[in-house]
Image (cartoon, grey):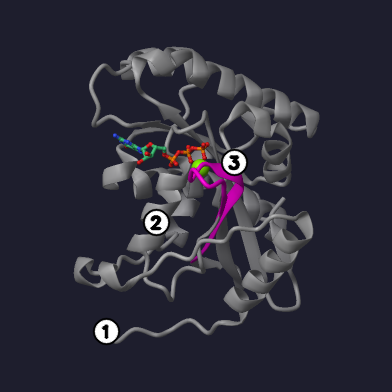
Amino acid sequence: MAFVNHVTKNLAIKIVYYGPGLSGKTTNLRYIYFKLDSSSRGELVCIETEMERTFFFDLLPIRAGLIGDFKVHFQLMTVPGQIFYEASRKNVLRGADGIVFVADSQIPLLDANLESLDNLRRNLLELDRDIYAIPLVFQYNKRDLENLIPVETFNRLLNPRNLPYVEASAINGVGVFETLKEVAKMTVPLVREQVLGQKPATETERVRGAEEKKVEVEFLPSDKEADVSLKKYKLRTLEEIDMELERLSREFLDKPKKTRPA
Ligand SMILES: Nc1nc2c(ncn2[C@@H]2O[C@H](COP(=O)(O)OP(=O)(O)OP(=O)(O)O)[C@@H](O)[C@H]2O)c(=O)[nH]1
Ligand SMILES: [Mg+2]
């Protein structure tokens, strides 16, 4: 369930990037961070090991449009893919409004993808949630490499329900925003239903409704990209993480949105 503040009229939609270790989850968030104008996003927080593997999660808040008179922002989060960080994965999944499953397209990693999807299903069940009752989009990543699992095989094994999927090369930015838009398109109507009690009558209306609201993302002209520096946080205790998250959300929500010259 999205986080709603009825006083400040802010609404946070949580999207979790899930998938096996090294499939490219953090790479998706980094790309979004570098491409979005700083007025449209908060800081990217990466809580990672010395080897740049996600240790607890990454978090990137980005602004979207309005739902009713609520200002919407997406909290994009990744889980650590490495098997032994099970507790972190479960914590990050709690309260997810939508999920992107980032699969690694390299043939030797087929089993790792299947195991990770099964792990997602089990963790959701433990949180009393059904994987098919949550907006879910597949990203078949690393399509720039050779020796790839064919898309049809992925769809047959991971995605028998024909949910949206995107072929991507996150490292080159291919498919990254497309994936985000797909998951936003599925998630926004459900959140609107929860928050405003507006129930779209048909499936078509659901999709159309989402399109009308246009979950806008702005791009930085590429010559400006070099100016943006990435902040990395090495936090060690849960208290430190809690404090830092609270500070960042306050800072992000208080920051007035820059109006851009037409
Ligand atoms: N060739 C190629 N490499 C990629 C792509 N996306 C990510 N990578 C590389 O894969 C490695 C792992 O990427 P990360 O984004 O850190 O993976 P992760 O899923 O966050 O990994 P964990 O945090 O351990 O779960 C990095 O070296 C990336 O540069 C891609 O589309 N193509
Ligand atoms: Mg990561």
Percent x, y of residue 236: 69, 55
Of callouts 2 and 3, the N-terminal one: 2
Question: Quarter containing ligand 1?
Answer: top left
Which residue is denoted by mark 3 in the rendering? 79
Query: Looking at the image, is 11 positioned above or below residue 151?
Result: below
Residue farthest toward the left in the current orientation of the protein: 223
Q: Is mark 3 within 8 Å of ligand 1?
A: yes
Identify the residue shown where x is 36% and y is 46%.
Answer: 176
Q: Secondary structure at mark 3?
A: loop
Count up the numbered dots: 3
Residue farthest toward the front in the current orientation of the protein: 50
Of callouts 1 and 2, the N-terminal one: 2
Q: Nearer the viewer, residue 82 or 247?
A: 82
Any part of residue 160 in sight:
no
- Which mark is in front, 2 or 3? 3
Labelled pair 1, 2 in contact (Cβ < 8 Å): no
Specify start and end residues of the magenta stretch as a single range. 47-63
Q: Which mark is residue 32?
A: 2
Which residue is denoted by mark 1 in the rendering? 262
Callout 1, which amino acid? Ala
Q: Is residue 4 left or right of residue 170?
A: right
